[in-house]
Image: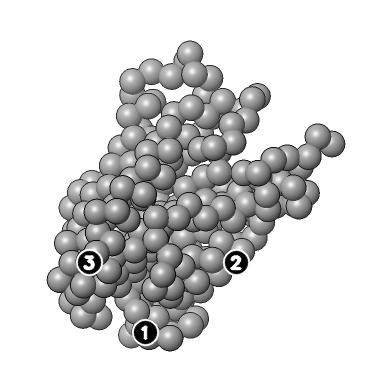
Amino acid sequence: MKKQTIIVTGSSSGIGKGIAKYFLDRGDNVVINSATESKLEEVYQEFGAGDNLAFVAGDISKKETGAALVTKAIERFGSADVLINNAGIFDSKPFLEVDEAYLDKFLTTNLKGTYFTTQAAISQMLKQQDGVVINIGTPLVNHGLGGWPASAPVSSKGAIHALTIQLAAEFGKQNIRVNTVAPGVIRTPMHGDKADLNAGLHLLNRVGDIEDVAEIVYAVAKSNFITGSIINVDGGKGAGHNLN
């Protein structure tokens, strides 16, 4: 497979870190990102600080961060082939308790961050006449959970799913492919030691591992004929759940 330059937002921990390592281990150039520079520097060193790795610290909700990521990819590696919009936040609050500031937090980081980082990447991909954008979504967009209110983050992720399909339509003729990978509950530091309590939300009756997501993201990045797709990597969570 051809060597590509991969940009991964929110890659100092969890799924984003795992995705970045997956591409790096398979020989691609990788630009990692996090809002916290000290954590990003740690990951950079942990990954070996090699010639095929670069990093840009910055809050993805700021438009200039996306532009800086693309600039770094071009300066270091000569192209920006794949953007993985992993950075995002998730939380739970009852619908009637959500105020404007709380809703704006998710719309700004999740939707606006994805939107403008993608804008920066696609501007470069048009010059290359080739490129892939992979957004990280959630099966909760189409499979709501009573008892765990999350209308604000789910609304922002729903917008990302819609954006995926629209951008695939707008840029397909320019050979730019846009897809969303939607994980179920994945064993990450965010869940601590409680991830397995959510096993029953999945038809497989277990939670996923970071590599389950990374291998699908990698396959989509390397494909020339997948676009406009929402791909659940969720153990069947989006299709249904176990009653017991």
- Residue type, mark 1 in image: Lys
Q: Is residue 122 visible?
A: yes
Q: Nearer the viewer, mark 1 or mark 2?
A: 1
Residue, x 68% and y 49% (percent of image)? Answer: 236
* First in sequence: mark 3 vs mark 1: 1
Give the image location of residue 32, x and y in percent.
36, 66
Q: Nearer the viewer, mark 3 or mark 1?
A: 3
Give the image location of residue 22, x and y in percent.
51, 73
Q: Give the number of the disc on residue 3.
A: 1
Q: Give the number of the disc on residue 211.
A: 2
Label 3: which secondary element:
helix
Label 1: which secondary element:
loop
Q: Give the number of the disc on residue 132.
A: none
Residue, x 34% and y 35% (percent of image)? Answer: 107
Q: Is residue 58 positioned above or below 99 on the image?
A: below
Front-most of 176 and 54?
176
Q: Is residue 189 visible?
A: no
Front-most of 197 and 44?
197
Residue 122 left/right relative to 241: left
Q: Give the number of the disc on residue 174.
A: 3
Q: Residues within 10 Å of mark 3 (few under 14, many from 20)?
A: some
Give the image location of residue 75, x and y in percent.
18, 76
Which residue ends up furthest to the top in the rendered image? 96
